[in-house]
Amino acid sequence: MSEVAATVRHMTRAIFHTATTLDGYLATDDDSLDWLFAVPGADEAEAAFAGFLADVGALVMGSATYEWMLRHEGLFDAPEKWAGYYGTRPTFVFSSRALPRVPGADIRHVEGGVREHIDEIRDAAGAGDVWIVGGGDLAGQFADAGLLDEIRVSIAPVTLGSGKPLLPRVLGADRLTLVDARTAGQFVELVYSVS
Ligand SMILES: NC(=O)c1ccc[n+]([C@@H]2O[C@H](COP(=O)([O-])OP(=O)(O)OC[C@H]3O[C@@H](n4cnc5c(N)ncnc54)[C@H](OP(=O)(O)O)[C@@H]3O)[C@@H](O)[C@H]2O)c1
């Protein structure tokens, strides 16, 4: 492999990877994901996700996503569940509030512009990618700053009519290029590069 190819392969990318409804919502208005867990036969989608996670070095999420994890997974009673999902990967939680940390997990509180924190986030990711877990506005903040490299959406056969938006931004075809499309059980996974 040439030196250039090796550099490209190991360049840290910021990837917004999420499940979404067909009508573009990440969660209901009251932060429920019950619609997602109700989709039958999620095994194939989970296998594809495991392959994605293997290349992730650090996670980024907003406070609503983090607090959903705390509540839904009961992480104060069973903090070891965090490592079961994410291993020891550093996780950057954007919030203007001081949030409780999951015991034993590498949770790093950040706030303000994403540009201020991108060097620290990339350093923490090492040779891996940065997974922007959500929500949509935080992914939008990365796009606004020109720091979002890829969007991977796994579309569930569900509509909600309203809820927490997938990506509340205007990104035209001049910025998004479809690079992959595949099915995984009842899900369709679309991968776009962002310029
Ligand atoms: N379908 C899926 O696979 C999937 C994936 C991810 C998330 N979700 C769900 O979707 C919902 C997303 O919620 P959401 O849209 O409200 O997004 P979110 O990004 O999880 O949380 C938004 C909050 O994060 C904080 N924040 C964001 N940017 C910040 C910044 N630059 N500096 C400081 N604080 C910042 C703010 O709250 P404070 O300052 O008040 O803390 C903001 O209100 C959650 O229910 C989550 O569980 C679903």
Image (spheres, helix red, strand yellow):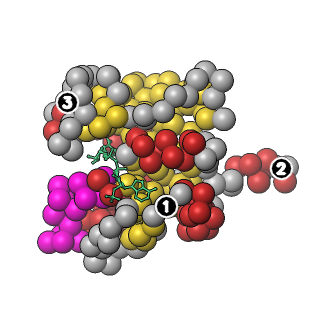
Residue drawn at (53%, 57%), measured in percent from left and top?
Answer: 113
As drawn, is 76 to the left or to the right of 154?
A: left
Q: Residues within 10 Å of mark 3 (few under 14, many from 20)?
A: few
The x, y position of residue 16, in whole percent, is 48, 43
Amino acid type of the residue tagged 3 in the rendering? Pro
Q: Which residue is mark 2?
A: 4
Amino acid type of the residue tagged 2 in the rendering? Val
- Disc 1: residue Cβ within 8 A of ligand 1's nearest atom: yes
Q: Which residue is mark 1?
A: 112
Q: Nearer the viewer, residue 31 or 111?
A: 111
Residue drawn at (16%, 39%), measured in percent from left and top?
Answer: 34
Find the distance from the CA under tag 2 to the CA under tag 1.
Answer: 34 Å
Residue 179 visible in the displayed image? no
Which range of residues does the magenta coloring cover? 65-79
Find the distance from the CA under tag 1 to the CA under tag 3.
Answer: 39 Å
The x, y position of residue 117, in whole percent, is 56, 64
- Magenta run includes residue 186: no
